[in-house]
Image: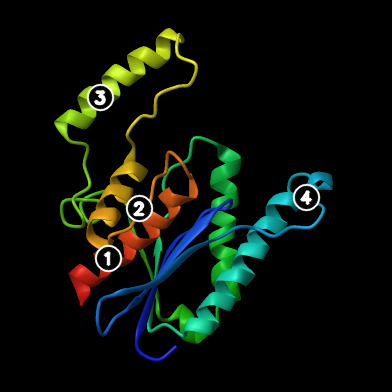
Amino acid sequence: MIGKFLISIDYSTTCTGYAIFNLDTGKLVRYGILKPKVIGVTKLKYPKLQLEKIRSLAYQLVDLINEVQPVAIIVEEINRHKSRLAGKTLDGGHYIFLDRLSDEYLAKLSFIDSDGKDGWRSAQGLNLYLSLQDKVLNKERRSLNKKGKLAKKLPIITKKHLACRWVNEHYKLSLDCDKTSSDGDLADAIGIGADYIRRRC
């Protein structure tokens, strides 16, 4: 690829979203997802299963970085986890990825928070917050879902939905995390890169 490129990464142990931007033009060039490729997954148990997954993702990310040769790499910082194992695996995944990177690319890598005053979703970033209408709709849907009379639970509007909305509006895409869960990972990766470009370029 010719030009100066940014790779933004929404790292996850199950589905990692990435986006590639041309820093000269600010345009989104490519985006996609990476999933762990592990042979014999049904026979593996903790901790071998988790280790093989994060190794696979690390190798795929390094291959992508070597192909694109970015001048900047931005990765979403780890958030709190409800599951101890998920948090432990995600932490480990970040470090295995960092360990596989060359010193050249390690020097080009930085992390960004998703939330908080300087997060990419914050008012300083892309300003992704639930509207009053979103909050009312979520309240109604939670109530209906709790009653359990519906054949299928109604979706609650989350941060992933907000990222999809923003990305669809600004990049003329049609991501829908209710139909395809990985669309939320794509939207986050694109949002991370878009925020980086808006603030720093």
Q: Which mark is residue 41?
A: 4
Please report contact status of discs 4 and 1: CB closer than 8 Å, yes or no: no
Q: Which of marks 2 and 4 precedes in the sequence? A: 4
Which secondary structure, mark 2? Answer: loop
| SS class, disc 1 | helix
Residue 69's x, y, as percent? 46, 85
Separation of residues labelled 4 and 3 (CA atoms):
40 Å
List x then y, in percent, for residue 197.
24, 72
Q: Secondary structure at mark 4?
A: helix
- Give neighbour class at mark 1: few <14, some 14-19, many 20+ (Cα, 10 Å): many
* Mark pair 4, 1: CA separation: 35 Å
Q: Is there a contact, CB below 8 Å, between mark 4 and mark 2?
A: no
Q: Earlier in the sequence, mark 1 or mark 2?
A: 2
User: Where is the N terminus found, in terms of image quarters?
Assistant: bottom left
> What percent of the width, then of the height, locates residue 109?
41, 74
Q: Upstream in the sequence, badge 3 or badge 2?
A: 3
Is 38 rendered above or below residue 199? above
In the figure, is residue 110 to the left or right of 52? left
**x%, y% of residue 99?**
59, 72
Q: Quadrant of the C terminus?
A: bottom left
Distance between the Cα atoms at labels 1 and 2?
17 Å
- Foreground mark, 3 or 2? 2
* Number of the label disc, if any, that sits on residue 174: 2
For label 1, the residue is: 194
The circle drawn on residue 137 is 3
For marks 3 and 1, give the one nearer the viewer.
3
Q: Quadrant of residue 190?
A: bottom left
Amino acid marked by disc 3: Leu
Q: Residues within 10 Å of mark 2 (few under 14, many from 20)?
A: few
Please tell me which residue is depicted at 27% across the width and 65% down the height of the picture: 194
